[in-house]
Image (tube, rainbow, N blue to C red):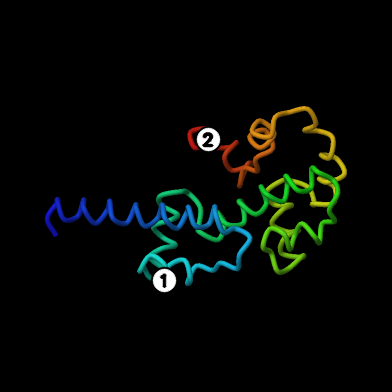
Amino acid sequence: MTSRAAEDQRLSDLARLRRVRDRIDREYAQPLDVEALARGVHMSAGHLSRQFRLAYGDSPYAYLMTRRVERAMALLRRGDLSVTDVCFAVGCASLGTFSTRFTELVGMPPSVYRDQAAGAAAGLPACVAKQVTRPIRNQEARAAQPHLA
């Protein structure tokens, strides 16, 4: 492949990866799997997963779960929904998987987060609260390697 053709292919792949990321951001509460995401951009699931990780640092599934946990954090801060209601509202089908992923990303179970965070972001504009409370995957690994932060 010539360098021009290779560059055109790389740009095409990046555009398709952006479409996948945008779809995850938009449809995080819908049932999404890597195979369906890959079909939507005419890639194989394996190729999509590899390229997505290279471009964004996470697999499509990890990115999806981070979006779901971010939304769950906002719902839990409101304090008027149960953890189960929040789990299903953000598109998770299993309370156990949701709780495990939430704990991995946030550092505490969703029920504890709800109890502690209900008033913590009070008075902050929503855009600031979202940034301050954003979960960061693998915080320990990033702290050990400051060049990745």
- The dot on residue 39 is 1
- The dot on residue 127 is none
Residue farthest top in this picture:
123
What percent of the width, then of the height, locates residue 60? Answer: 51, 59
For the residue pair 118 and 1, the one nearer the viewer reads as 118
* Residue named by callout 2: 149
Q: Marks 2/1: CA distance?
A: 32 Å
- Circle 2: is it few (<14), some (14-19), or many (20+) Cα within 10 Å? few
**Amino acid type, residue under disc 2 in the picture:** Ala
What percent of the width, then of the height, locates residue 79? Answer: 85, 46
What percent of the width, then of the height, locates residue 84? Answer: 81, 61
Figure check: 102 above or below 131: below
For the residue pair 44 and 129, the one nearer the viewer reads as 129
Figure check: 142 above or below 87: above
- Name which residue lies at 57% across and 39% down: 142
- Name which residue lies at 28% across and 55% down: 12
